[in-house]
């Protein structure tokens, strides 16, 4: 028996035993058995092709349904599709398909209601079916680095989500149902084509990390200042032009990124953000900072490169913040 055939038989025995909880495709398979797949095609269809040798369809379905597989890591495997037979892996909790060449998803994927972590990042997806709303146990959803233009309203059904990664797509708007995701802790919408953010974002009061950089947002929606648990907030590379005084509501923020935002001044209320440790203001049109910035005694890094602050003003800022590393150049 060849080495490759031996590997196949080992995996088949493991699958049929129902002992397999995790599959990592590439150089390793299973939670306990390491198998070198260098001699066989490295994609997820391997599993189903092995099962496919059985001609009795009812037996194949029975075999699939006995699997206790909970985790599949098929990232970086040059996959071009997801086989419809994935529907039989009804115990699946984690599915990582990151960094492949998948352009579409089978409807059967949306029947895996035990999924809590679905990673579809860095593929060629152009749309997400509204059936995504069926995956109501999802805690983390990764859709970053695709070609998505529309986020279906059914995203609002995923009320258990704590992390949502949507960066590097082509979204022009976000459905107001985003406000239903009240458990969200992390939301990344960077590098899209958003011109505005729905006011319902103000309902996401558990958010600790909100990233809106590199869009076309012209103003910060006032509702964002309801997000008093924010620790990191970035809205850089947007033409917002003004930082509202209500920014002072966000008293827990440690990192605030406002580079390249067409700012000409900062509100004095920024001095109330006393937990602020990092403030990024590069590439704006600032000529001075308010004296209240001296109240930011925890500020350790202040980035002011590519502004219009003259030497006299720089000297003032340094005197106000003696324990802060200030980067003017």
Image (cartoon, grey):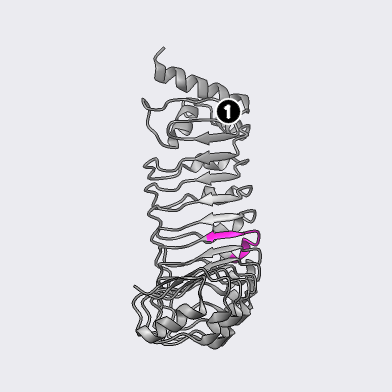
Foreground: 87 or 163? 163
- Position of the N terminus by quadrant: top left
For the point 40% across and 76% down, the residue is 304
- From the top left corner, tell me how far across and down residue 57 is, in percent: 54, 31
Q: For residue 181, which quarter of the picture?
A: bottom right
Which secondary structure, mark 1?
A: helix
Q: Residue 38: where, in percent of width, then height?
A: 37, 27
Q: How many marks?
A: 1
Above or below for 77 versus 268 = above
At 45% from the left and 37% from the top, the residue drawn is 44
* Residue 59 in sight from this viewpoint: yes
Residue picked out by circle 1: 59
Which image quarter holds the C terminus? bottom left
Q: Nearer the viewer, residue 27 or 172?
A: 27
Please name whichever residue, 187 or 320, is drawn nearer the observer in this view of the structure: 320
Which residues are the magenta region? 156-164
- Mark 1 crowdedness (10 Å alpha carbons): few <14, some 14-19, many ≥20: few
Q: Is residue 160 magenta?
A: yes
Tell me residue 163's x, y (percent): 57, 59
In the figure, 49 relative to 294: above or below? above
Q: Is residue 144 magenta?
A: no
In the rendered image, the vertical position of residue 321 relative to residue 83, given as above or below: below
Residue 24 versus residue 10 in the image, above or below: below
Please report the residue visible at 61 percent of the width from the left and 59 percent of the height from the top: 162
Residue for point 57% across, 45% down: 94
Residue 263 visible to the viewer:
no
256 relative to 103 in the view: left or right: right
Residue 87: % across, % down: 55, 43
Position of residue 219 in the picture relative to residue 58 (left or right): left
């Amino acid at each position: 028996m060849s080495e490759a055939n031996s590997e196949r038989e080992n995996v088949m025995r493991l699958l049929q035993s129902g002992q397999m909880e995790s599959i990592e495709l590439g150089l390793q398979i299973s939670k306990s058995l390491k198998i070198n797949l260098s001699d066989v095609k490295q994609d997820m269809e391997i599993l189903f092709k092995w099962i496919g040798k059985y001609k009795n369809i009812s037996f194949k379905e029975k075999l699939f349904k006995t699997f206790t597989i909970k985790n599949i890591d098929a990232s970086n495997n040059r996959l071009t599709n997801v086989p419809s037979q994935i529907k039989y892996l009804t115990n699946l909790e984690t599915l990582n398909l990151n960094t492949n060449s998948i352009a579409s998803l089978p409807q059967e994927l949306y029947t895996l209601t035990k999924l809590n972590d679905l990673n579809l990042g860095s593929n060629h997806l152009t749309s997400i079916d509204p059936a995504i709303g069926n995956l109501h146990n999802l805690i983390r959803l990764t859709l970053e680095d695709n070609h998505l233009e529309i986020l279906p309203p059914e995203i609002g059904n995923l009320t258990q989500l704590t992390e949502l990664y949507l960066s590097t797509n082509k979204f022009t708007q976000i459905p107001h149902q985003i406000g239903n995701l009240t458990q969200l802790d992390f939301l990344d919408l960077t590098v899209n084509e958003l011109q505005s953010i729905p006011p319902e974002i103000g309902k996401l009061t558990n958010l600790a990390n909100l990233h809106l950089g590199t869009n076309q947002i012209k103003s910060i929606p006032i509702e964002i200042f309801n997000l008093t648990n924010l620790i990191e907030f970035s809205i850089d590379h947007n033409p917002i032009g003004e930082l509202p005084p209500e920014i002072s509501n966000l008293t827990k923020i440690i990192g605030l990124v406002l580079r390249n935002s067409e700012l000409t001044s900062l509100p004095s209320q920024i001095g109330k953000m006393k937990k602020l440790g990092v403030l990024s203001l590069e590439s704006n049109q600032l000529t001075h900072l308010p004296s209240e910035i001296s109240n930011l005694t925890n500020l350790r890094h202040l980035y002011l490169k590519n502004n219009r602050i003259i030497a006299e003003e720089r000297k003032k800022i340094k005197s106000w913040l003696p324990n802060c590393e200030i980067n003017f150049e």
